[in-house]
Image (tube, coloured by chain):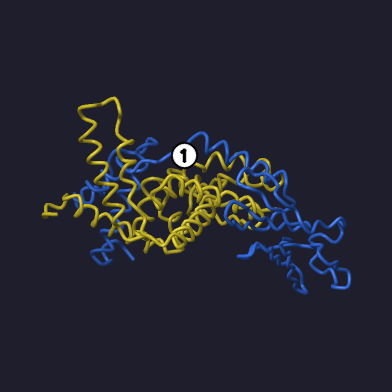
Amino acid sequence: MTLFEREGSEVEALLTDRYLERVLARATGGPSSGPVDALLNPVLRDAADQLRRDLVRVHPSFRFEERLASRLAEAAAALRMPAAVHIRGKSAVFPELQGRVTVLDKEGKIVAQVGDNPDAKQRANFGLPPDQWKEGICNSPHGASIDKDGNLIVTEWSKFGRVLLYTVQR
Amino acid sequence: MARPVFGRVRAAGEAGSARVTHLDRDRALVEEARRDPASFDALYRRYLAQVYSYAYYELGDHHEAEDATERTFLAALANLDRFEERARPADGDGASTFRVWLFRIARNVVANQRRGRRRHPQAPIEAAALVADPLDIEGGAAVRDEAAAAWQAVGRLPADRRRAVVLRFVEEMSTAEIAGVLGRSEGAVRVLIHRALRTVARDLGRDGRPR
């Protein structure tokens, strides 16, 4: 379909898109004007130019940047193939496919690790038969959540399906 | 390991000839982070300000934006093995499907956070005051007023139009990238932005009609 076969508003949306492509490319040395500029409604051009000028990127504080960098570094170092993350309050729960679940706090420090499987052959083993499972020991955690009472629920990646529940000792 | 994706695209002025282009600009960093999760830091530094800014425009609060940013990067680190590069030749040299994937996570995190607090986002008007040049005292007030008006106009847009505008103007994403983030077609994104600009123009009194 050519430009002239489209509906009026569709054509204007396309012209707007072309104009924005050029306006946004200007910062990186693109052309200062294009052949379709004159075809676009000047009201839309002005609005686009103002948003281009006034909508600026907002940067986080340096303190936040470094704090999160440390937390990510701790998480990266502490985890064994994390499969997901579930955040509850100030805790982040990582089910790790390599047979463990780790809970980190806001600063990235390990709060708890449960279900650690010492047998590397059983970790991330999709076909591990149920008669080899051990109570409370994870094989391939893939999802995790914390309920309102603080109990930890873990689901595993297994062709047989498995859900583990770690209750809070009070 | 990710399968290499190469596309044969024609460069301008190279009629009849072709060149091979490397499509996803983040591929090397993603592969490195998969081999060694500590290397995720490079991707984090590259996209921190973008994700934070997006969250801030959506939530209108620095603390909430920090929270959403933190959740986004932790989820990205945890799920990096699931990321699939999907760059197409049409996406061009600078395309990053990792960025699209990251922003999809951010969009979901922000949506969950907004559902959690069950109240309307506030337009981050006060931030517009920080945008103007603090040394230009005379001109500063007028610039600040204009910037604040633009921020307010964008803040009043329906959520899907506001998101598209922020991704286009602040994050400088292409229409294709925005379509990937929002899960819409490129045509739908063009229409969203066009309608948003019409509303903003009317709101700012640029269409000659009384506000």
Question: As shown in the figure, which amino acid type bears the numbered disc 1?
Answer: Pro
Percent across and percent down for residue A138 are: 79, 62
In the rendered image, the vertical position of residue B190 relative to residue A35, given as above or below: below
For the C terminus of chain B, give its image quadrant.
Answer: bottom left
In the rendered image, the vertical position of residue A127 relative to residue B153, given as above or below: below
Percent across and percent down for residue A139 are: 80, 63
In the picture as drawn, the residue positioned furthest to the bottom comes out as A160
Residue under label 1, please give it.
Answer: A60
Q: Quadrant of residue A10?
A: bottom left
Q: Secondary structure at mark 1?
A: loop
Residue sitting at x 16%, y 50%: B205
- Classed neighbour count for the residue bearing mark 1: other residues with Cα under 10 Å, few (<14), some (14–19), many (≥20): many
Q: Colour of chain B?
A: yellow
Please tell me which residue lies in front, A42 or B83: B83
Q: Colour of chain A?
A: blue
In the rendered image, the vertical position of residue B188 relative to residue A67, given as above or below: below
